Amino acid sequence: MILTYCYKIKPSPEQIAIMERWLELLRRHWNYALGQRLDWLNRTRSPIDRCSLISEPIGVIPEAVNYYTQQAALKETKRLFPDYKQIYAETQQINLQRLNKAWDRWRKPLKHGLRGGRPRFKKQGQLRSFVFPRVNSPRAGAHLKDGFLLLSRIGQIPVVMHRPIPDGFTLKQCTVVKKADGWYCCISMKDDTVPELLPVDSVRSAVGIDVGLEKFLTTSDGEAIPIPQFYRKAQDRLAQAQRVMSRRLKGSKNWKKAKQKVALLHLHLTRCRKEFHYQVAHWLCSKYDLIAHEDLNIKGLARTKLAKSIHDAAWGAFLEILQAVAVKRGLLVEEVNPRGTSIECFNCGSRVEKSLSERVHCCSSCQVKIDRDWNSGINILNRGLMAVGLPLNGCGKSIQDIEEQQVSFVSLRSLHHNL
């Protein structure tokens, strides 16, 4: 199991200047290496025995460009540009490895034929992190000990150790990140003792969750979490800060100060949303052994007119956090097919067509009338139980209890208290 802890560091002004210089040099090298790859691709796109439909550069066909050829050229880069000798060698190699991964995601499709986006040239300030691939080993470039981080060619930096590193974990990698409110080090650590997943026969409680925009999620037990809408509530403050920035001369000191305020607001929203996701995930994992959720196409949903609300809810980030928390606790998380969960009646299985504006599920066949999201949560639970081979037991309540009970909301305060 691999964990990553993020600690704030307090470098001196001289160390900040060195790290910012590293980021700028690594950004230029990224752009040069990406330009090499794109030039090779354009020159070899068309076979030599036929013409291309678009204009292509002519000349000597260059040799194939990959990670190994670009890594071998680092010596020549340091000879021509002595500033690169100041950067730790493995940090430069990791920079090329990042580019190689981005290139492979674009050029090599996944199982379902999906590809990543084309790697882009980075503008000034867009590269905000560099990596030391080894920590606390004999030839490592980073050493963390007694609240201090010793980085090769940068020096010793105090670290705010707000939580201790767990016993038995081996430190693997250190990533230095520049954020809007300062510098951070992300320490990746590994423990070979992975918690065993709970056997299916030992599952005592299960739940299906239906995520939405009216309520953040509704469980098959009839409990709902209200959606916080962090971005929607902060839109006025963000708009005001962005107006101030737009009135400043771009590149001036006042423009940079205004830009910093906008970045701090976005960072605050990100942290609030992430904390909320962790609270909900721990609340679910503390109550249930099996959690079933829909396998949503979030990228497709985010292309609709509800894109801003979907991005504000951040379902994808929440489901990743839920999976990580469940694995750490040895619990089960099951993805189910989302098709028809809101339309099918949980009691009789008949299809009840409804628009998004209809928030109540009314079945004319069995006369069941419950909240739309609650009905969907029960269907998700039943599909999750079928997927793992457990008997269907609904949500553990009779139809009369379901009809009489209203959806109960769980507040953030009660979530925090339960944790």
Image (spheres, grey):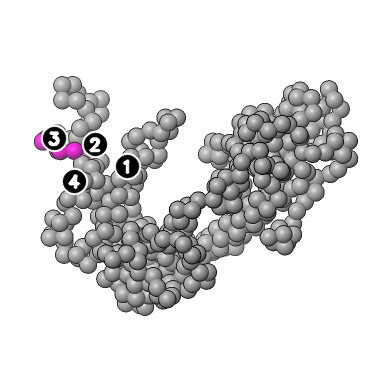
Please name the residue that numbered disc 3 is placed on.
61
Q: Amino acid at mark 3?
A: Ile
Sequence-wise, the earlier of marks 3 and 4 is 3
x, y percentage for residue 91?
Answer: 29, 59
Q: Is residue 409 left or right of residue 386?
A: right
Task: Evaluate whether residue 129 shows in this view.
Answer: no
Looking at the rendering, in which quadrant would you find the C terminus?
bottom right
Q: Does 402 sit left or right of 82 as displayed?
A: right
Q: Amino acid at mark 4?
A: Thr
Name the quadrant containing residue 124. bottom left
Q: Which residue is mark 4?
A: 69
Number of the front mark, 3 or 1: 1
Decide which of tag 2 and tag 3 comes sooner along the chain. Answer: 2
Q: Residue furthest left?
A: 60
Mark in front: 4 vs 2: 4
Query: Mark 2: which amino acid?
Result: Leu
Earlier sequence position, callout 2 versus callout 1: 2
In the image, the segment drawn in magenta is: 60-64
The dot on residue 103 is: 1
How far apart are labels 3 and 1 at the CA level?
20 Å
